Image (cartoon, helix red, strand yellow):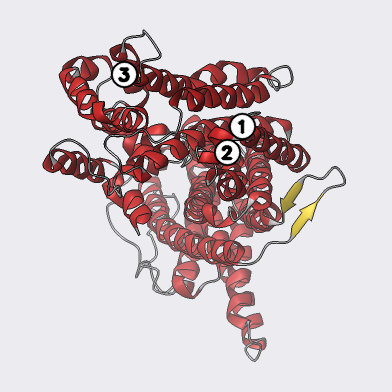
Amino acid sequence: EMRGVDMFRGVHESAADDAEEDDAANQQFTAILRAATELVTEIDIVKNQMKPCFAPHWHIEALWSSCVAHVCSNHIVQQIGGPDGQNLPELTITQLLELVAWVEYFRETIEETFPEVASMRDTKKTYFEERPELFDSDKRSVNMQNATDSLAWVNNMLWEVHRLAQEEFLVRTRSQTDEWLDKVYGSDTVKNQSNEGKLTTSLCEDVYSFSSVQLRTIRERLSKKSDALILAVCIILSHMRSKQVHARNNFLEDLETCCAASNDFTRMSEKCEDMIAELMDQCEFSEDMVATIDATSNELMAVYSSDAVYSARSVHIYVFDPIEEEIGVRLFEEQWEAELVDNDLALSLVRTLEDFHEDLEQYMDNFMVVKSVMSLMSATTIFYAKCLLQRAEMHRSNKKPYFGDVRTALDRMTGDIRVMRDYFDGLVPTMPSLKKNIEKDFEILTTIHELMSIAAGFSVSEAEDFILVLQKRVRDVGITKHIAGDLWHLVQPTEERYVWELVESMEEQLVAIAPVDDALALEVNDRSYVKGLRLDEMAVKLYVKSRRNRPVKATAVESIVNNWRTNWGGGDEVAAEEE
């Protein structure tokens, strides 16, 4: 006991000498933990080197350990403002880490030296105000029951201190992580372009420069198997995930920023994997803790990876902006039908896609380029269908077709579809994964073309067969009615009511083959879906703001539209379009 008293007396005397210094309190706290560590370390020396020199009934290791536990706990509890840790909020995050680490070291040492203490969660008495009575009445033999009881009490009391310090540390970690992430994501990133043309920003480096330092600081001060380390890592990773989810769309401003974001998010996923692998190599976690950190890190990497793909696929929005302005307004107009006999607009669209494709190959890795091209292919067919349906909205005659010559218009559409499909077919040798999607995407246009041919009387196919195909794509009888009605309105407006009634008569069959799935509508608000790439989404946005009178009861149309507003994410997307 005198050994401990002398050691801590020296610490306090040194603190008094440094009282004038600004960080005197911090120095004293650090010195007390250092002295306590030295005393606990000597428990092992006493057990292995000094014990053989004493009579067994002296139980020198128990005597030494009890005194060390009593002296160290008293000084540490004083430093933190009592056993309830009143002064813990005043400690620095480094001091909290050192306190957590010391208690873990003390607990491990005591329970390894005295295994029976590990299971003693209740003790006979407390020792706040008095020293434990370590000797029997003869004052010669150590009372092992009292010694063990006092050790168990200190062990349990300090573990409560550990819990309080750990909670304060984790609160501080959350706050510090959020503050740093807000600063990183709220600042302008530095834009970079490699010699090969790949676009990136400093986001990855900005995020991981701090997280690496933060994790290294924590790892250096805690033991290799500390639960506090795992909890801190999981907090950091989960907050990184949360911030990424809330801020990721801010990086998608144009084609170049989408490409840079895709590259950045890919690198961030890889960086996370490397950081966790390094942590696992340097630490000794239990299987449960490994599973916990694996789950948390996998969630973060999954977000980064899905965001990388989402960013790559989002380029279609910026690719089709100029296409909408230059080509969309001219498609299906009189000049397109009568003069552009070589499918000039479709060729112009393809040339625009080729130019952007070259940029994408320069800006992104090949894997992400394929993702971008897939979205461009879907966007191409949706764009073409939308332009056609928009002409139906403009057409006000219920007697005359929209086109001057329906057969010529259908032939022109056939040529357009062939030009666009040939472009994507030509990419298959270098992008084999495109092949399975080409038929699926262009089925939209071939179905629309065939239904128009049937409506015009140029095809002997049954309308019911292709209405079924359309229903399988949109899985919504209301959308199927509107699209079929518009196609008839364009080429045979006098029969529009007939096709509405035909679809209504097929409703039971349509729902059985392709039932309504509200989840499909709600997917528009999910990260796995990129807006503007689905026929049903495009149709809903078009029809909720339609002002065309259809040859059916207005209440029936209104009921369908209200149902869409309910199902499609509460109508947020729809409302945005209407505004």
Horizontally, residue 39 falls left or right of residue 397, namely: right
Which amino acid type is marked by label 2?
Arg
Image location (x, y in percent) of residue 551 = 19, 36
Image location (x, y in percent) of residue 480 = 29, 28
Image location (x, y in percent) of residue 204 = 67, 51
Q: Are marks 2 and 1 in contact (CB under 8 Å)?
A: yes
Which residue is rendered at x = 63% and y = 48% of the image?
Answer: 258
Q: State which tag comes first along the sequence, 2 or 1.
A: 2
Circle 3 or circle 2, nearest the eye: 3
* Extreme-bottom residue of the structure: 20
Q: Which mark is residue 371?
A: 1
Q: Which mark is residue 467?
A: 3
* SS for callout 1: helix
Q: CA distance from mark 3 to mark 2?
A: 30 Å
Pointer 2 residue: 313
Q: CA distance from mark 3 to mark 1?
A: 30 Å
Q: Is residue 343 above or below residue 326?
A: above
Which residue is rendered at x = 59% and y = 29% of the image?
Answer: 374
Residue 281: which quarter of the image?
top right
Horizontally, residue 42 falls left or right of residue 108, namely: right
Image location (x, y in percent) of residue 457 = 35, 16
Which residue is rendered at x = 64% and y = 91% of the image?
Answer: 20
Q: Are marks 3 and 2 in contact (CB under 8 Å)?
A: no
Q: Is the residue marked by circle 3 packed among few (<14), some (14-19), or many (20+) residues within 10 Å?
A: many
